[in-house]
């Protein structure tokens, strides 16, 4: 108890010391927005439909699976789609289109996830200047209908047609603080600029009581739509050795070694704990580039564990970093699986509008408006 009290006191004291820096960050954000509002800094209005999928906090809200869901929805309805993102933690600069030879160092892990899911059915590109990236994509692919902007809510150079704000149900933005005290990239009040709010990682069983509580807490504005999504976990898939599926089927592991570098492990923890008697965690910071030292610690712990009924589990987001040649060679003989997920939206009488219909109706209407404005 004394140890907990000391740690808690130290944590609160450190947060107090960081508040002046949060104030500086807040003033910087206000100045930046002011420069755009008086048009000293100019915003680019794309000529085709752009949908921004973003959040106020620094990761962990589920942007990638929601972008995948939205892209599949549009493709299935006959639209030509591209995905544009910054390419966080890549070692390159400028515009790059993702291809089969791209590595995590070239384009970042999220871009490779999109390429893994869609192949050649859509174009995936990275560019830190989204306005420049959009212009290149439009010029290269004149038949594009929609560009999805991954994590561009704070990128003021572009004025997207539709802004979707994601917020984790268990860690909503209104309980957070501005960086560096908390993880918010901009003030909480910025949520009002979103056209729709998606509350992610909601319980899979819909509860009207929880829904009513959410409505009150989020203070949805009159112009905003609200959607509720949840994570659906699928079956384990081998990362390197496809023959592992035959040995793993219908067998519950005694121990699961989870090796991942994602922003929010809460839901993953809950799900995996239901599947094993012992969960051994190897968690790293979001987008952490795994090192040989990290992998060696995992292998030693795995080999020393006193049971043969054990597996290693990671996420789809981690695969591009595990496939780096300097890491992959140590993992080929290990039973490593990844846990794929799907995003699903609650459909209930309380939810007056369907997400699929909302997106498709908007794109259809906005395309018509764009054609009229260009005449």
Image: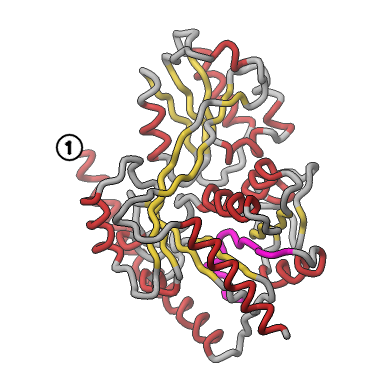
- Name the residue at 61% across, 16% down: 244
Q: Quarter of the image holding residue 22?
A: bottom left
Give, as a single range, the part of the protein colored magenta: 144-157
Q: Position of residue 153 (x, y in %)?
A: 52, 67
- Name the residue at 63% across, 69% down: 49
Q: Quadrant of the C terminus?
A: bottom right
Q: How crowded is mark 1: few (under 14 residues within 10 Å), some or many (20 or more)?
A: few
Q: Is residue 152 magenta?
A: yes
Q: Which residue is tagged 1?
A: 1
Specify the color scheme: secondary structure
60 displayed left or right of 372: left
304 displayed left or right of 201: right
215 displayed left or right of 268: left
235 displayed left or right of 202: right
Q: Position of residue 255 (x, y in %)?
A: 43, 17
Q: Position of residue 6 (x, y in %)?
A: 23, 45
Is 8 in front, or is 172? 172
Is 297 in front, or is 375? 375
- Name the residue at 72% across, 66% down: 133
Q: Is residue 232 magenta?
A: no
């Amino acid at each position: 108890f004394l140890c907990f009290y000391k740690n808690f006191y130290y944590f609160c004291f450190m947060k107090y010391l960081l508040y002046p820096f949060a104030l500086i960050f807040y003033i910087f954000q206000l100045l930046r927005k002011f420069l755009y509002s008086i048009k000293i800094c100019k915003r680019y209005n794309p000529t085709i439909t752009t949908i921004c999928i973003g959040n106020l906090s620094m990761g962990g809200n589920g942007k990638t699976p929601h972008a995948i869901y939205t892209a599949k929805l549009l493709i299935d309805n006959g639209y030509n789609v591209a995905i544009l993102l910054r390419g966080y933690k890549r070692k390159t600069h400028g515009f790059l289109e993702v291809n089969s030879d791209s590595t995590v160092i070239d384009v970042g892990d999220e871009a490779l996830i999109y390429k893994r899911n869609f192949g050649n059915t859509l174009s995936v590109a990275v560019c830190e200047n989204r306005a420049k990236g959009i212009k290149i994509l439009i010029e290269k692919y004149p038949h594009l209908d929609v560009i999805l902007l991954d994590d561009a809510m704070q990128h003021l150079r572009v004025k997207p047609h539709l802004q979707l704000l994601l917020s984790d149900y268990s860690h909503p933005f209104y309980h957070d603080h501005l960086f560096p005290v908390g993880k918010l990239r901009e003030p909480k009040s910025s949520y009002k600029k979103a056209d729709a709010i998606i509350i992610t990682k909601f319980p899979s069983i819909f509860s009207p009581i929880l829904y009513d509580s959410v409505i009150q807490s989020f203070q949805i504005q009159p112009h905003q739509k609200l959607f509720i999504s949840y994570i659906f976990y699928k079956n384990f898939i081998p990362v390197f050795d496809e023959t592992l599926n035959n040995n793993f089927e219908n067998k519950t592991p005694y121990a699961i070694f989870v090796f991942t570098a994602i922003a929010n492990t809460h839901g993953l923890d809950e799900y995996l704990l239901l599947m094993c008697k012992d969960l051994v965690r190897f968690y790293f910071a979001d987008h952490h580039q795994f090192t040989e030292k990290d992998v060696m610690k995992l292998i030693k712990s795995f080999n020393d564990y006193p049971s043969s009924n054990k597996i290693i589990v990671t996420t789809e987001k981690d695969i591009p970093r595990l496939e780096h040649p300097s890491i992959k060679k140590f993992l080929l003989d290990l039973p490593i699986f990844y846990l794929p997920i799907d995003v699903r939206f609650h459909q209930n009488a309380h939810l007056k509008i369907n997400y699929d219909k909302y997106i498709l109706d908007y794109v259809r209407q906005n395309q018509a408006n764009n054609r009229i404005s260009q005449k």
